[in-house]
Amino acid sequence: MTEPLSNGAVYQSVPESYVLPEHQRPRSSPPSSAAAIPVVDLGGDDPDRTAEQIVAAGKEFGFFQVINHGVAEDVMASMMSAAEEFFRLPTDEKMVHYSTDSTKLPRFHTSVGKEQEKVLYWRDCLKIGCYPFEEFRHRWPEKPAGLGAALEAYTAAVRSVALRVLRLAASGLGLEDEAHFEGGELTAGPVVMNVNHYVACPDPSLTLGIAPHCDPNVVTVLMDNGVRGLQARRRRGEGEGGGWVDVDPPPGALVVNFGHQMEAVTNGRVRAGEHRAVTSARAARTSLAAFVMPAMGYVVSPAPGVVAEGEALLFRSYTYQEFVSVYTAATGNRDAVLARFRNNNG
Ligand code: OGA
Ligand code: NI
């Protein structure tokens, strides 16, 4: 068992077990001198233009921020307060949910949450199965009071944002069936949420909250408490490193990123947004990442109409279950994961 960071301790220095080897520290890979993460107005009156913007952001970053998304301010605020309140609970009340079994829901863990970790990441996390509500509701943590109600309202709202984004993406990619991503098997799995908490860190240059990764699912909707920490990697072409860009959402905005499955079903037209979380010396950061995913048995392959005649397929087809197993074993490392699914087209 690894002691969670949110145990009331005030850290004067970074405990040795959290100090990353030099080549993994945040400053060992360059910041991007270019561009900020695009902001997409979902309330605009030109859906074709919105769709274009989503596809363009999907190509460059796999990341964008949405405004006028229709999620009520109080729904966002209640969810965030319940989340922050959870991490203020006495340690033993959080530990009721502690597990190193990555399939357990809900599950409280720290760092990556594996049994044996060489170096620890500066993060505590409560992972909750959210949707379908009938399946998960009876397992939601009882404390803090109000978490369940907040979760239900928030999950329903951000799930519909995710589905709207997928419809727009299908339209922006010129799919004949605009509901192909949104309505079908691709989003028929559960919605699971990482409630991440990064306590203030005395020396952010030595630590990371989360190592670079792409999310394994289809699309993720994220909000945070306004403390900066999320960074997205800008990629230009295969093999080019690109640089890290701060994702610093304007108040009220939500952050959207595509996961590995969007890259696969679009045959790379949009990419999975690679990201990491740096720590903050200033304040504790809380973030909520809601993952929309396929059912485990879904066979992932390019959407009809995406692939041009004669175009090489980037990935072999596979079940989402297989993907998740490989991903978990590789702890999310993008190159290690994709090496197992790429076609060798030469
Ligand atoms: C995640 C994640 C980033 C953040 O939970 O998968 O990448 O900003 N979170 O906390
Ligand atoms: Ni992530």
Image (spheres, grey):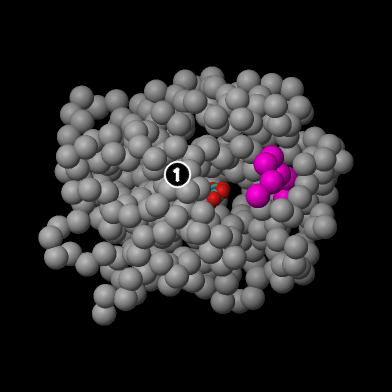
Residue 20 falls within the magenta-colored stretch? no
Residue 21 horizontal side relative to residue 332, left or right: right
**Is any atom of residue 226 visible in this view?**
no
Amino acid type, callout 1 = Pro
Q: Is residue 125 above or below residue 60?
A: above
Residue 343: % across, % down: 33, 71
Label 1 element class: loop
Q: Is residue 57 above or below residue 212?
A: above
Residue 113 horizontal side relative to residue 292, left or right: right
Residue located farthest toward the bottom when viewing the structure as drawn: 346
Q: Quadrant of residue 166?
A: top left
Q: Is residue 89 above or below residue 259?
A: above
Which residue shows up at 24% across the image and 27% down it? 44
**Is any atom of residue 16 visible in this view?**
yes
Which residue shows up at 64% across the image and 43% down it? 127
Which residue shows up at 54% across the image and 22% down it? 153
Residue 99: % across, % down: 76, 50
Q: Quadrant of residue 302?
A: bottom left
Mark 1 surroundings: few (<14), some (14-19) or many (≥20) residues within 10 A: many
Residue 136: % across, % down: 63, 31
Residue 17: % across, % down: 76, 68
Residue tagged 1: 294
Q: Nearer the viewer, residue 242 or 172?
A: 172
Q: Nearer the viewer, residue 268 or 197?
A: 268
The span picked out in magenta is: 103-111
Which residue shows up at 73% across the image and 45% down it? 108
**Is label 1's Cβ within 8 Å of ligand 2?**
no
Q: Quadrant of the C terminus?
A: bottom left
Q: Quadrant of the N terminus?
A: bottom right
